[in-house]
Amino acid sequence: MKKFDFEPTTRIVFGYNSLEQLADLVSQIGSSKALVITDKGLVKTGHVEKALSLLRKRSISTQVFADVEENPATRHVYAGVQAANDFSPDILIGLGGGSSMDCAKGINFIYTNGGKMEDYWGIGKAKKPMLPSIGIPTTAGTGSEAQSYALIAQEETHSKMACGDIKARFTSVILDPELAKSAPREVKAVTGMDAISHAVESFVCTRKNAISQMFAKEAWRLLSSNYKRILEEPENTEALGQMLLGANFAGSAIENSMLGAAHACANPLTARYKITHGIAVGLMLPHVVRFNAETVNGGYDTLAIGGAGKLAAQISDFRKINNWPENLRDFGISEGELPVLAKDAVDQWTAKFNPRPLGEKELLELYRLAY
């Protein structure tokens, strides 16, 4: 068995209406000024106002930064840092999807340690203490609330920077299925596929270990058995809760291992063609599973009876129920553009941890399979 170093530091509060515990968590941390980082769409749902009301009832001062957008870039982080400078919070609350939580972590880096986002690209580069923080996901997707990394895009190049530090982890996390009800069907679909890809890729990556595989296996069970349910029964709180928990476990699996080729291939598709990440990774994942099958030597059997073929087919079925494009051609991508994508993909950090070694040649093969 591989060595591992498991250092859990985040308190997780799970259950229906668990948002009601927000003020208690803030008070227990010893904070009294909370900056809530979110997006304008979530403000319209009423979730932000509910959180603010809970905090104000306990005399906790609040301020909202609601200018987060999908795939946050450095400009979103810097705008949030300015809001923090104006308010001087002693705790940050990321409320929303993975973008809000990544942005909250990015703000925490710069607000407490100064500099620019590029200074923290990598791991362990924050030399000063960081603010305590609370993550409250409203989608079952990225698992950002379980990770010490902030994924922030460079404004000019659109390259995603993974900026990690154990101090950036959320002090507490609230997983409340009631909050996930308001997400539109398409959001549930794409974020759920993202979570599924996390479970599958982390389970077989080269950095897998007993802890990460434990989280990934349970994440796959929860996600695969509830994905169709949340799309067909959008008010099913039980299914939404299982998806939230599955996404969190998949995030924990990543935190203790890594990802692989599907994410390496998906990121250039999002950067160059604005293809939604969950759709891009869902398109690539079945091909990656089949591509890795011989190398992992039955490693997928634990996830699906029938191994890689059955697993790839199941993922494809999830994609089909959403009527997503079947191949890269359907996105208007020409075959001549595939080598450029492969060149971009080989530089993606996750490519290094795929169980089957990857170079430009292999990544080009994957794109051609998806073409």
Image: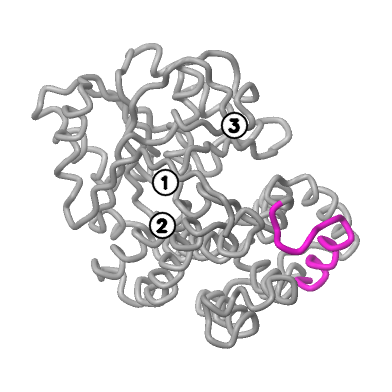
Is label 3 in a helix, a strand or a loop?
Answer: strand
Q: Residue at x 85, y 62 (%)?
A: 364
Q: How many marks?
A: 3
| 14 magenta-colored | no
Q: Which mark is residue 146?
A: 1
Q: Position of residue 24 (x, y in %)?
A: 14, 34
Contact between marks 1 and 2 (CB within 8 A): the answer is yes
Quadrant of the image occupied by residue 35: top left
Q: Which label is found at residue 123?
A: 3
Colour approach in the figure: one colour
Q: Residues within 10 Å of mark 3 (few under 14, many from 20)?
A: few
Say whether residue 172 is left or right of residue 193.
Answer: left
Q: Is residue 367 magenta?
A: yes
Please give the range of residues in magenta: 353-371
Residue at x 16%, y 27% (from the top left corner): 27
Q: Secondary structure at mark 1?
A: helix
Task: Establish if 355 lies above or below 56.
Answer: below
Q: CA distance from mark 1 to mark 2?
A: 8 Å
Q: Looking at numbered disc 1 in the image, what kind of residue is underneath it?
A: Ala
Q: Quadrant of the C terminus?
A: bottom right
Q: CA distance from mark 2 to mark 3?
A: 21 Å
Residue for point 47% across, 32% down:
166
Q: Which residue is mark 2?
A: 249
Between the C-alphas of marks 1 and 3, the distance is: 16 Å
